[in-house]
Image (cartoon, helix red, strand yellow):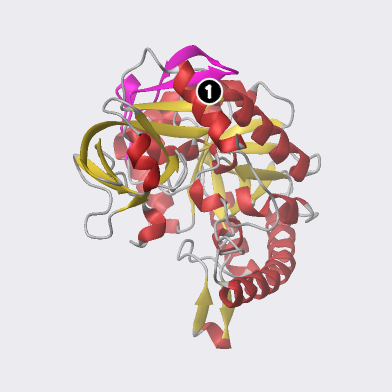
Amino acid sequence: MTARAADRARYDRATAALDAPLALVDLDAFDANADDLVRRAQGKPVRVASKSVRCRALLERVLARDGFQGIMSFTLAESLWLARSGFDDVLLAYPSADRAGYAELASDPKAAAAVTVMVDDVAQLDLIDAARQGGREVVRVCLELDTSLQLLGGRVRVGARRSPLHSPAQLAELARSVARRPGFRLVGIMAYEGHVAGVGDALAGRPVRSRAIRLMQAAARRELAERRGAAVRAVRAVAPELEFVNGGGTGSVQYTAAEDAVTEIAAGSGLYVPRLFDNYTSFRGRPAALFALPVVRRPGVGVVTVLGGGYPASGAAGRDRLPEPYLPEGLRYDPQEGAGEVQTPLLGSPADDLLIGDKVWFRHAKAGELCERFDVLHLLEGDTVTATVPTYRGEGHTFL
C-alpha cells in the first residue's frame, strides 16, 4: 500500500460516520508543516497569514507554537473581529476603504493597540482621518514596499501590481508624511515578494520553463534584498523606533529570513499545503487540508460522478486553479466538463472500484479559500476525528 493509499484508508475510517461533502484538516500534517516553516525561518518569528487559514481554532493552535507570532489579516473588518476575539497583534496586509471600520478602530483603545493598518498613499491617510468620527486613538501604520523586479527602465515588470512605492526614496517620503501627521504612528514595513514566494519553480513536464523561473527568482531575490535593505535604512532614519519589517511567504521563507533587514516572515499556505505548493524545489510539505465529495452516480465504465466540486481558486483562470482529485489516485476530470457547479464526473480506472456513497478526496488549489465552501473543519489526529471547529464562514463571517 502506498503512503497516499494509506492516508485514504485513514481518512475514510475516520469519517465513516460523516456524510460528504466535508472538509478535513490532518493535524499531524498541519503540525509538521508548522515545524518546517519555523525551521526555514531560521529563528525569525513567523506571522500567520489568516487568509490562508480562515479558522480561529487553527490560528490559535499555530500561534501557541514556538516560532509563531502575530497574524497577517486581509480585511479591516476581519482585523477588528480578531482583535475583539483576543488576538493582540494583527497586521492588515492590504489597504482598506472601510470607513465604518476606521471609525471603530479610532475609537477603541484595545483595537487601536492590536491592529496595524496598511498604507501606501497619502490619500489613504486622508480617508482614515475623514472616517474617524471623533475617535482620537492613534492609528498604527505599516508601509508596503513594491517588490516587483523592474527591467529596462520599468518597461518589463515581474511581480504583482501592489504598492506604488518601489524605491527607498518613495517609501521614505511617505514615512515623513506619516511622521508629520497627528493621530498616526509608523510601526512597520511590509514587502511581499509574490513572484518568488507564490510561484513554483519545478513545474512537472516543463523543465525549460522551470529553469527560467529559477533564474528569474534568483535575480529577483538579489535585487530585492539590496533594495529592501536600502528602504529599511531610509525609513528608520525617519522612524528609528520601527517595530518590524515583514517579508516573505511560504515559498520564500528561508531566502527572506536570510536578509538582515527583515525581522519577521509571513506565511500561511504552508500550513495546509494546497496543490499550488507542490512545485517547489526549496521545500516539501504534507497535504493537510482536504475535502471529500460523495459518489452519487456511476454513468459507465471508468466514470463516477461526485456531488459538487466547482471550487476554483482565485487568480488567472486555468487548469492549475482547479481542485485536484487526490484520492483514490488516478482519477481525472472529463475535459468536456471539468469541475462542475453541482456535480463533477471523474474518469479513470479507480472509478470502477467506487460505490455509490463512497468518498473521493480532493485538494484545493489554494489554501484558505477552501474554508469559504465549508462551515466546519473536521480535525483528524491519527485515525480519529477529535474535534469539529467552525471556519470563518461557520461563524457567520464572509469578509470578502
In percent of width and height, residue 128 lies at 39, 44
In percent of width and height, residue 21 lies at 31, 27
Task: Please tell me whether residue 179 is drawn above or below residue 281 in the rendered image.
Answer: above
> Image point 57% across, 88% down: which residue?
152
Task: Please tell me whether residue 332 is drawn above or below residue 53 in the rendered image.
Answer: below
Crowdedness near tag 1: few (<14), some (14–19) or many (≥20) residues, C-alpha within 10 Å: some
Q: Residue furthest bottom?
A: 152
Q: Quadrant of the N terminus?
A: top right
Q: Quadrant of the C terminus?
A: top left
Q: Is residue 41 left or right of residue 364?
A: right
Which span is picked out in magenta? 374-400
Check residue 398 for magenta coloring: yes
Q: Which residue is mark 1?
A: 10
Secondary element at image label 1: helix
Q: Is residue 27 left or right of residue 39?
A: left
| Quarter of the view holding residue 198 | bottom right
> Image point 35% across, 16% down: which residue?
18
Camera-nearest residue between 249 and 201: 201
Camera-nearest residue between 363 and 44: 363
In percent of width and height, residue 289 lies at 49, 33
> Image point 22% across, 46% down: which residue?
340
Check residue 214 for magenta coloring: no
Count how many numbered circles sit on residues in the image: 1
> Image point 39% across, 37% down: which residue?
370
Amino acid on which disc 1 is placed: Arg
| Quarter of the view holding residue 264 | top right
Residue 105 appears in the picture as rendered:
yes
Camera-nearest residue between 391 and 159: 391
| Quarter of the view holding residue 228 | bottom right
Residue 242 appears in the picture as rendered:
no
Q: Is residue 196 left or right of residue 45?
A: left
